[in-house]
Image: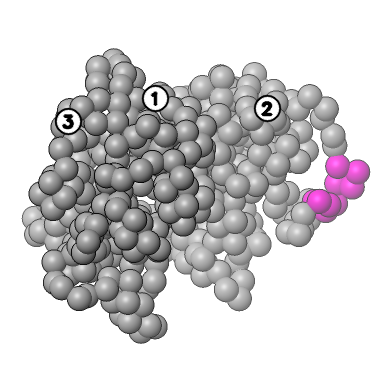
Amino acid sequence: MIIESPATIRPKSDDLHSNSTKLIFKEERMKIIVAGTGYVGLVHAAVCSEYGHEVYAYDINKEKIQAYATGEATEIERYVNEPSLSSLIKEMHGKYLHFTDTIDEVIEGTDVIFFCLPTPPNEDGSSNLTYYDKAAEDIARKLARRKDKRRVVLVNKSTVPIGTSRHLETIMMLNNVENFGVSSNPEFLAEGTAVTQARKPDRVVVGCDREEDFKILRRVYSQFVNHVRIKYIQTTPETAEAIKYVANTMLLTYISFWNGVGARIGERIPNVNVDDLRRGVTADDRISTWGSYVSNGAGGSCFGKDIRSLIYQLRRVDVNTKMLESSYEVNEFQKVYLVDRAISEAGFSWSTKTVAVLGLSFKKNTNDMRDASSIRVIETLLGKGVNRIKAYDPLSNEEAKKVFTAENNILFSKIEYYESAEEALEGSDALFISTDWEEFRGLSGVISRMVKPPYLIVDGRRMIPDYQDLVERGYHYLAVGSPSLQPGT
Ligand SMILES: NC(=O)c1ccc[n+]([C@@H]2O[C@H](COP(=O)([O-])OP(=O)(O)OC[C@H]3O[C@@H](n4cnc5c(N)ncnc54)[C@H](O)[C@@H]3O)[C@@H](O)[C@H]2O)c1
């Protein structure tokens, strides 16, 4: 069922998309289906409709579709909470953006179908294509019944193993779909800035086999073709698929380099200041500041899963994957090693303690908890005998409740959720900062007001620049990248 907005407003002029800086003429308008409306699909559908394309955002999850169709921020943000996304949806819904839990009514006349489906990891690290295949089969059967035989391009935005476009082509052929092309157009957005990035990506990578399909995608992305700043890259589907894996693996490897080398130097070699080390090294234009901030590991739905998938894919063609394995291992180690450092360096016993955990989402400005470091931290703390976790996150308390269920682990019943850092700190014996939310920066005043020494502060994000004051007042401070600082040191 297609769900229209409560007050469907049609544009006054059909010639130009009036309410956007990105103008598109009706001759350029395409009919697009976006299959899968999670973080990637919902943002992509909204921004494509903002260009002026006619977009049908499709998901088998009826509750999500109904929530999005209300146009209400609180409803949309229950599923995807990205800055300015809900207001964009509110503006576009009923104009060029439609929500539907079936594509039967809209498949006729469709030019492009984007696949934005989940591709979670299997136990062995390979990509699980169950959701993807199911959607592809379903869409293939519907395409085969089309009366309108115009060319339709099926585009992978999901991160899929190299060669999946070919696999998609086979599914279509086995279902007797006529006049179709397959394409890979990987998504590079980072959560927290997804809308901004979708409006102005640094690159658009499009892999196709035929010029006619490149042409259709150039119409979809007409805003970006020949743009002075945005690189519009046309290549083979396999190269496009590989670009996504190499990019994500490179990013995680860079983060792991700083965590595995920079942080260790700052922690173990006397008189090395890790912040100055970072500033000095990244003053070189060839070395990125992004990723150089040491932390308790990188989470999120992509880095870990993508590097594991690439390792799996490369092992199958006999490529040595030691470097990638190390990147992954360093990142996993980093998520929990501070818990052990507190024992070995601060002599702290976690047993029976109450611990405030600030920050649950995998990074700031998102409610996404997938593979968040906080999950491993909380599991490890509870495994060490912590009596009570007082958790607070500005956005993801509700998401966290879905992750930390007693069915997953009976110890999770020891987690309590609070509405502010102050409330979480009150009555705690130790603090663990796990996410770099801006509001945690300079938390020292709140800490000294809410809790008194002896008290252990574990800072996984180096969020307290004036930690020295706290140490002088008797607090024990332990941060990633620095030696443990005890009162009197
Ligand atoms: N989240 C990111 O930051 C990000 C960035 C780049 C690439 N990616 C990749 O994009 C893909 C999607 O990621 P996501 O984070 O948006 O996932 P998600 O889990 O948030 O969303 C996927 C959506 O697909 C829907 N779905 C499942 N089966 C379906 C079907 N048969 N038909 C229609 N809809 C169906 C689900 O209900 C869900 O809403 C993954 O391959 C991921 O690796 C994600």
Q: Residue furthest right?
A: 12
Q: Nearer the viewer, residue 71 or 181?
A: 71
In the rendered image, the vertical position of residue 262 relative to residue 363, given as above or below: below
In this rendering, the label closer to the viewer, 2 or 3? 3
Mark number, residue 69: 2
Q: Label 1's element?
A: strand
160 on left or right of 436? left
x 82%, y 30%: residue: 8
Q: Is residue 337 visible?
A: no
* Quarter in which the C terminus is drawn: bottom left
Residue under label 3, please give it: 351
Residue 137 location in percent, x, y?
41, 27
- Name the quadrant containing residue 198: bottom right
- Name the quadrant containing residue 209: bottom left
Q: Are marks 1 and 3 in contact (CB under 8 Å)?
A: no
Amino acid type at circle 1 is: Glu
58 on left or right of 426? right
Amino acid type at circle 2 is: Ala
Alpha carbon separation for disc pair 1 and 3: 17 Å
Residue under label 1, please give it: 416
Which stretch is magenta? 11-19
